[in-house]
Amino acid sequence: MKIDLKKEEHNIAKVEVEIPAKDGLDAYNRAVKSYAQHVNIPGFRRGKAPRNIVERQVGKERIVAEALETLLPKAFSQVISENKLQILMQPRVDNYDFEVGKDVKVSATIELKPEVILKAYKGMTLDVEEYQIPDDAFDKSLENLLSQSATLELVVDRNTKAEDVIVFDFVGYSNGEKIEHGDAKNYTMDLANSNFIPGFAEQLVDKPLNKEFDVNVTFPENYHEAKLAGQPATFKCTIHEIKHKVMPELTDEFAQKVGPFKNVDELKADIQDYLNKQKENADRKNSEKAIMDKLHEEVVVDIHDAMIKREADSLLEEYKQKLKSQGFTWEQAIEAQGLDSIMKTINDDALFRIKNSLIIDKISGEENILVDQASLTAKLDSLSAMYQMDRETFAKYMFQNPNMMNNISQQILNEKVISFLVENNTINFVKPKAKKSEKTEKKSEKKTTKTKKSTEE
């Protein structure tokens, strides 16, 4: 077999293949025989019709197509092996010349895996902002734990307070029209932990029982329903019940009730241990991100547009499925965010994912990092426990879904490579940069404006 391969820009290779006439004839005759066995040809028993009759009944093009299906996998495999190609997709046939008795000529395009050049991926020293446990984190954690065990007592002799839980009716209006699904009766709200429109819960404070009043708010600019995004609204509200939270006392008895603790000291130690682990996890994630960001900045790789499009198409389908699961349509998303904005985000994410995957594959190849059976078993055990499924049933289900198993293997490989990177680079934890206060930012903004005005004058 003759092979003429030419590599072009953007990781594309063009190949011309000549398959010997005898191989082409053998494949053609096998295809004729196959059609004769499976196609009902009047006047002939199955498999007994001569070639010219089969050709007339089936058509030469269909027979040629079947012959090529048996010839090309072996031919392309030889092209890939002899030229030591790393391919992304199976070769795409551009055109062919198949005439029985003559050499079969095929032209094809092969998309190659991009070459990845990394200046360095180990032995680096990076500064990473250290996660700071908020000063009030311990007190808030303890308060939340007490709050979860709080009881509610009805209040009838005062207005609402910010810490109360209320039961109320509301009806919303915007631009003179009643808001669809913007009303409810006997709705329960914890005023201190509300996820309503910003500013809504605050206006329910210091309000009396059984008297109608208005709450005026503005929907966020990024509100999921485009018709309401950025629009003012008025909600007519009536409070029917006010409930005051009664917090339990922090005692050894309380500690024993909420967990395997003998006393308050053990409970407090457990909270502090949780906060410390939270910090440890945050520092680890920040370190991983810093390393990968550095590699993304410095990697040299030529990614073909077709590769980005395939990944973007996959992400777009994921996004549409997510919308559907949340009760939204693709049309609603376009109306709310704009098609250009959505597609830019998807294309950016696609490029990021491709780069990330190529970097991981490059390092795993250089360092011989593999997915072994022990790692796969451990991951399946972890996932089956998370989904609360029998381990054998879960593993059987996964092995019956090759795409899922590939995803799990890639996830394991990612984790192994990232662990390798963290272990083989030096992370200097530094104090977070002080954030400018709102007043400082406004002063800076005014100063800049004045300077600009002075320059213009």
Image (cartoon, rainbow, N blue to C red):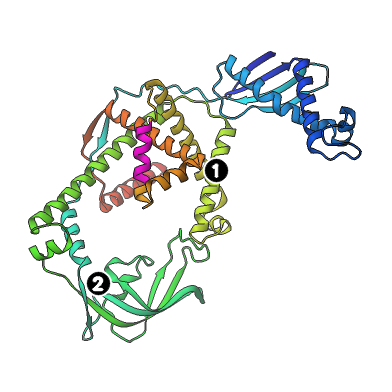
Q: Confirm whether the magenta stretch covers residue 408.
A: no
Q: Residue at x 28, y 53 (%)?
A: 438
Circle number at residue 162:
2
Residue located beneath label 1 in the image: 314
The quarter holding residue 427 reads: top left
Disc 2 or disc 1, which is closer to the eye?
A: 1
Amino acid on which disc 1 is placed: Ser
Indicate which disc, 2 or 1, sits on the residue closer to the N terminus: 2
Tell me if residue 291 comes above or below residue 222 in the rendering.
Answer: above
* Residue 375, magenta (yes or no): yes
Indicate whether 292 appears above or below 192: above
- Looking at the image, which is closer to me, 305 or 395? 395
- Label 2 neighbour load within 10 Å: few <14, some 14-19, many 20+: some
Q: Which residues are magenta?
A: 373-383
- Camera-side residue of 56 and 412: 56
Query: Tag 2, which secondary structure?
Result: loop
Residue at left offset 83%, top offset 36%: 46
Mark 1 surroundings within 10 Å by alpha-carbon count, few (fewer than 14), some (14 through 19), many (20 or more): few
Is residue 22 at least partly visible in the picture?
A: yes
Determine the residue positioned at 50% across, 42% down: 400
